Amino acid sequence: MRMHNADETCGVAQAALVLGDWWNVLVLREVARGHVRFDALAAELGLSRKVLTERLGRLVAQGVLRRSLYQRRPVRYEYLLTDAGEALVPVLVAMQDWGDRWVLGDGTLTATAAQDGAEHTRVHALVGTRLPTDLRLPATGAESPLLAPDARATVLFTYPGTGAERAPIPGAERDPIPGVERDQVPGAMDRTPQTRLFRDAWPDFRRAGVDVRGISTETVHEQAEFARAEEIPYPLLSDIDQRFTAALRLPVFRVDGRLRHKRLILVVDAERTVRQALFPITDAPHAVTETLRLASACARTAPTDPGRGPTAVGCVPNA
């Protein structure tokens, strides 16, 4: 690509050299989703082997992907994000957010979603897919895997966060905490209701063999302050680097300059397969009650091998 001399010092122009190609962007999207082997990438993208080989070679040469040998006979590689590639994940998420709002949507800033919209379709298409095996997120304790190793099923729920939202955004209603002063927990006056509802229902989830994990784009410090004040018994995971968002193509919205998750709930079995997806969340108490029912049914179909822990599951959707 021929560039104007002024473009040599322009970061936008230089980034466009990497991201400006349609297939380069989609290859990076799929690698961020956990499709890191050649055949998986070809299947997801519907791309010819020749074109895919060319694009992968170009992205490796540009330093955003690296090859990692996983098989010697015949030689096979995985394509993984480098540090420079990881730094592009928020760019991909920002592109998705812009496309959801301004191309697939009508430009309205909202924390909810239409039942027949693209975000709704994308979230419910997660059912039957497996979560990436190597995805770990910072947590209120330490870095944590997405799923609890001893759980027969795991509930992952996303929420906008506990931080203040100055602008009233539809679907991101504030949920005051009685008896807690605002300056005690930064932004706690704006927390989402699922956090408390899942806390109150935690004993029922544990009796059913189900673990619960909340995920937001807030920092670990913000989450830890909130968890201590509210006595949250389950981990809160931080997706501040947006790796989880990119891996699942989750719906987000931006307010006060911060990217936030829209509320959704996933029920995941012990083999990392998404079995249920609840989105959009318009009635939080009903959603938590329904999640308990669905996750309990999922856990019941996961027989335990004493030597191996939870084994294969096939959750019953409407049990």
Image (spheres, rainbow, N blue to C red):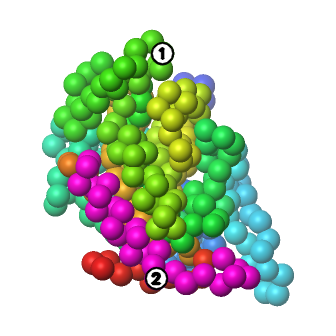
Q: Is residue 15 above or below residue 18?
A: above
Q: Which mark is residue 158?
A: none
Q: Quadrant of residue 102?
A: top left
**Which residue lies at the image location 65% right of the left edge and 84% below the top edge?**
305
In this image, 106 relative to 224: left or right?
A: left
Categorize mark 2 by other alpha carbons within 10 Å: few (<14), some (14-19), many (20+).
some
Type of amino acid at the residue the image marks with label 2: Thr
**Which residue lies at the image location 79% right of the left edge and 80% below the top edge?**
71
**Which residue lies at the image location 46% right of the left edge and 82% below the top edge?**
301
Residue 212, image x, y percentages? 49, 55
Q: Earlier in the sequence, mark 2 or mark 1?
A: 1
Type of amino acid at the residue the image marks with label 1: Gln
Q: Which mark is residue 184?
A: 1
**Which residue lies at the image location 55% right of the left edge and 84% below the top edge?**
303
Residue 175, image x, y percentages? 29, 30
Q: Residue furthest bottom?
A: 73
> Which residue is under mark 2?
301
Q: Which residues are magenta?
A: 284-309
Residue 28, image x, y percentages? 54, 56
Q: Is residue 41 visible?
A: no
Q: Is residue 308 visible?
A: yes
Magenta includes 303?
A: yes
Q: Judging from the image, what secondary structure is the residue with disc 2 in?
A: loop
Q: Is residue 237 above or below residue 61?
A: above
